[in-house]
Image (spheres, helix red, strand yellow):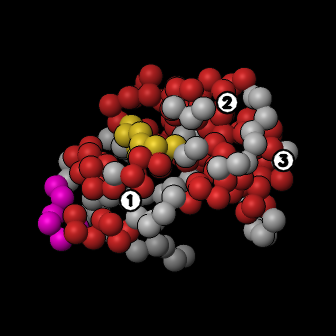
Amino acid sequence: QSRLPRKHDLAWTGDKKHAQYLDPELQPFIRGHFPDARYVHVVRDPRGAVASVLEAAKHWAVMPDYFRGTVAEVLERWAIHEEWVLRMKQEIGHAIFTVRLEDLWREPREIAKNLLDFLDLEISDEFEALIPQLIHPRDPNAKYASFALPEVPRATAIMELYGYG
């Protein structure tokens, strides 16, 4: 029986699948096995988030079912995922770092410094110099600026909370 090799002295691991790691059904397992886990929550303008999901649905062979939904259904799912974050913040707010993706593009050095501070890591001069090269040179949401979102009350409340209007 083969096993994955063990990583010695592993300090950090991560994944960008927020819908998995913030799922209330999975949280007891994650918090039970990783009680000191910290979460980096990146929220994106829902116009860009929804439009990119619908775009991905045209090309990806494997995807969550909701990717095949209507604009309103995908926006509803975005809101549900953000509600999971807000619920977790009430429970373990100190362990969640939230950043708007647009702020990361606008202020990459400041956000990176804040993020590393949250993770109890120090920023080296070499890493700080690399930051502008690691961030998109332009706002990928720009191509979705005219994407119209339907009225979804639960999404509207969350959009206002994060400053998306």
| Amino acid at circle 1 | Thr
Q: CA distance from mark 1 to mark 2?
A: 30 Å
Q: Closer to the camera, 153 or 60?
A: 153
159 left or right, relative to 66: left
Q: Quadrant of the C terminus?
A: top right
| Residue 70 image point, x, y percent | 85, 45
| Residue 24 image point, x, y percent | 58, 34
Tell me the residue that label 2 is attached to: 155
Q: Is residue 121 above or below residue 80?
A: below
Q: Secondary structure at mark 2?
A: helix
Q: Earlier in the sequence, mark 3 or mark 1?
A: 1
Structural crowding at the residue carrying mark 1, measured as other residues with C-alpha within 10 Å and reported as few (<14), some (14–19) or many (≥20): few
On residue 13, which mark appears? 1
Q: Closer to the camera, 26 or 74?
A: 74
Q: Earlier in the sequence, mark 1 or mark 2?
A: 1
| Amino acid at circle 3 | Gly
- Most extreme residue toward the bottom is 2
Tell me the residue that label 3 is attached to: 69
**In the image, what residue occupies the spot 66% across and 27% down?**
156
Q: Quadrant of the N terminus?
A: bottom right
Q: Which residues are magenta?
A: 122-127
Which tag is nearer the camera, tag 3 or tag 1? 3
Q: Is residue 5 above or below residue 149?
A: below
**In the image, what residue occupies the spot 77% across and 55% down?**
54
**In the image, what residue occupies the spot 42% across and 55% down?**
105
On residue 39, which mark appears? none
Q: CA distance from mark 3 to mark 1?
A: 32 Å
Q: Secondary structure at mark 1?
A: loop
